[in-house]
Image (tube, helix red, strand yellow):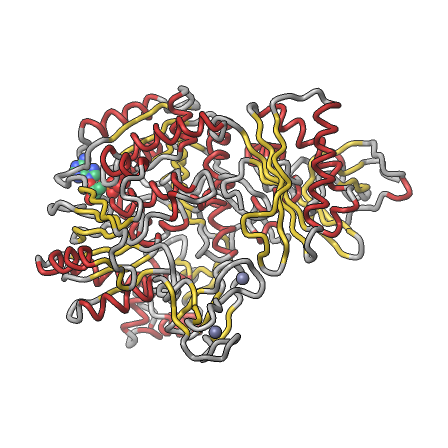
Amino acid sequence: MSDVILRLALPSPLRRLFDYRAPASMARQTLTPGMRIRVPFGRREMIGILVEVTDKSEVPADKLKPAIALLDPVSPLPPALFKLCLWTAQYYQHSLGDTLSWALPVLLRQGELAEARQERFWHVAPGARLDDPRIARAPRQREALATLAQHPHGVAHTLLSKLMLSKDSLGLLLAKELVQIEVRRHLPVERHEHWLAQPELPLNEEQRAAFNAVRSGFGGFHAFLLAGVTGSGKTEVYLQLIRETLEAGKQALILIPEINLGPQTLARFEQRFNARIALLHSAVNDRERLDAWLAARDGEADIIIGTRSALFTPMKHPGLIIIDEEHDGSYKQQEGLRYHARDLAVVRAHQENIPILLGSATPSLESLHNAHTGRYGLLRLNHRAGSAQQPRFLRLDVKSRPLDSGISGPLQQAIGQTLAAGQQVLVFLNRRGFAPTLLCHDCGWMSECPRCDARMTVHQRSNVLRCHHCGYDEHVPRQCPQCHKVDLRPVGAGTERAEERLSILFPNIPVLRVDRDSTSRKDAMNQLFATIQRGQPCILVGTQMLAKGHHFPRVTLVAILDADGGLFSGDFRASERMAQLIVQVAGRAGRAEEPGKVIIQTHLADHPLLVQLTEQGYFAFAEQALSERRAAGLPPFAHLALLRAEAHKPGQAESFLDEACSAAEQLLAELNLHGIELLGPVPAPMERRAGRFRAQLLLQANARAPLHRLISAWLLLLEHMPSGRQVRWSLDVDPVDLY
Ligand code: ADP
Ligand code: ZN
Ligand code: ZN
């Protein structure tokens, strides 16, 4: 019997590896870490990833099951990617098997061959001649044959129409055996000699300094924070650094936030370069994702662009990583493997010994702190590129002013004036739907979600009440469910209501709404943007989908209907997020010749953070916010981990967390660890959500190392705690949202 033991990572939440016996068919010397192996697991089969080959196991020999099959002749995971996954699993205290299954393309996890898709190629048959008498009177077939003859490697079926090759003519040629079809892998597209498809803009002085700084960091690990106001030409700096990377024979990886997936952002990269671009974002299907991943791995893609998970794309010749809008919340995954793609990107750049550039107009306080402490080089672009100027801010105090669907009188006037001057207006409101609540004017009933501690939003177009936390929905009732009177009123305003009201106030002006409800149709967003680009006066109403990446040259007034939520929220990051949102939305104003104005409606017009933000700008705000964080012992001056639990019955989550808390206290003493505080357990800010009762325990530490020592010992205890079986629990290292 073989005594070769395969130690595998399996897609399971358990933080351990699983041992199997290698069947005789698997020769030890052919096995390398990263290979995929099919194994029995309970009554199912699973695909695991080989981590190590050994000859000892703690599992008794008669309990060891044999592996079923080896799926790869060589490991599909390059060692660098494997190393990154190991680091990730360890840092986020997540099972390695589950980490790998988040990191790898879905088809690889399912056992698909780690090879690019096979394609059909059309070829001229050997011996076929253009003057073949059978096509003497068929000019279209002759033409098709002549075109095909110009492509000695054949033409992929998917490219026929691009070359004006008619499938009918080819079909007739095939019947005469003048052409052939071959099924094979796509030949790698050759690298271009000349990278630029479009001339570069001459960099201004600030851009040049930033470019030179990063350029001189090529060839080793260096992290830079490019803090440039909106419209300062950060993207142009990225593009020129990417060109340098390509010229050096290397690949560039660019991460963009989910919200920037718009065609505008991608087009800028595609138009600039004659490069092989691999796209990895939520809109590509599994097959395309695997092909892009393989192309990047094999050095057949020059530029890799994608959202969060594209961070785990292997590169054969890594040269540069760019994180655009590094402050964006979509870089943090909120379920399963709760990683932060920006933080991991820095780790990856370090492991691969390449430079990384984090760019934003509103850098996260974490990154600013890293710049202050010298871990990142700080590069500033303080001026808009070209002739555009920074917008002016106005805080409009709406205390004791009547609001008409969320819009005050002075704001209506300002909108009217802007439209009359032939310009466009952007109205920002981060709340979808018609109104956040439905209220009975007679008895005070409110539209509570039956499954959450939250109100259901009125959606008038679709005539439903919908909970934005769990998705539950029902018809808008005609009469009060409690007192049966009919005086039900929507309270407050969402984008749908603002849109409706603005259409009435400005009847001759198009009002375009941009939010998840209005743009769910695939091309709706593009149509909207086409209208906006035409430049006629119009009003755009939208949520944060409007905030980033878009270029609206004719918008000169930005109205922020409600900025107050971020100023008195319980979440310590709320003010940072609000400031980022305000500045990003404001950045849409006056991007071209006309100067822009930003009006912020608020009940807290004198709030120090708001005053500082609007009068001195984001960086002054950020300094203030950082000093508050320091005083309060909060990140980035402390390190957090959050243990969340939820259960069907009230009290279950708390009792699990109570037990977890005592276990942690005991470990702190046993391991002699200091500087860690256990805060809680407490009910989650929204205690009931989707029918489950939720609670949490926060760990706050002044240093990372002891926190991680505690957690790794602690999690092993938690996995075996009986009270943990009744609850769903998870640990979030460096949590972003404390809900
Ligand atoms: P950011 O990414 O910082 O928001 P962009 O790269 O989108 O800024 O640049 C804003 C505008 O300025 C774009 O229209 C861009 O073409 C233009 N621009 C950028 N760099 C220059 C430059 N050096 N000279 C002239 N125009 C520039
Ligand atoms: Zn009622
Ligand atoms: Zn709900």
User: Residue 480 placed where, x, y %?
Assistant: 48, 76
Q: Nearer the viewer, residue 282 or 163?
A: 282
> In the image, what residue occupies the spot 46% across and 30% down?
346
* Residue positioned 67% across, 50% down in the render: 728
Residue furthest to the right in view is 62
Vertical order, 381 against 647 (above or below):
above
Give the quadrant of residue 720. top right
x, y percentage for residue 419? 13, 60
Residue shown at the point (49%, 30%) measured from the top left = 634
**Residue farthest front in this picture:** 442
Residue furthest to the left in view is 421
The N terminus lies in which quarter of the figure? top right
If the picture is divided into quarters, which one holds ligand 3? bottom right
Q: Is residue 73 above or below residue 161?
A: above
Of residues 126 and 406, the one nearer the viewer is 406
From the viewer's perspective, is 196 left or right of 369?
left
Percent coordinates x, y for residue 512 in the rendering: 26, 64
Q: Nearer the viewer, residue 163 or 54?
A: 54
Figure check: 309 above or below 440: above
Question: Which residue occupies 33% across, 25% down?
Answer: 378
Residue 32 horizontal/vertical position (percent): 67, 35
Whether residue 644 is visible to the viewer of this picture, yes or no, is yes
Can residue 304 be seen at all in this image of the molecule?
no
Name the foreground residue: 584 vs 427: 427
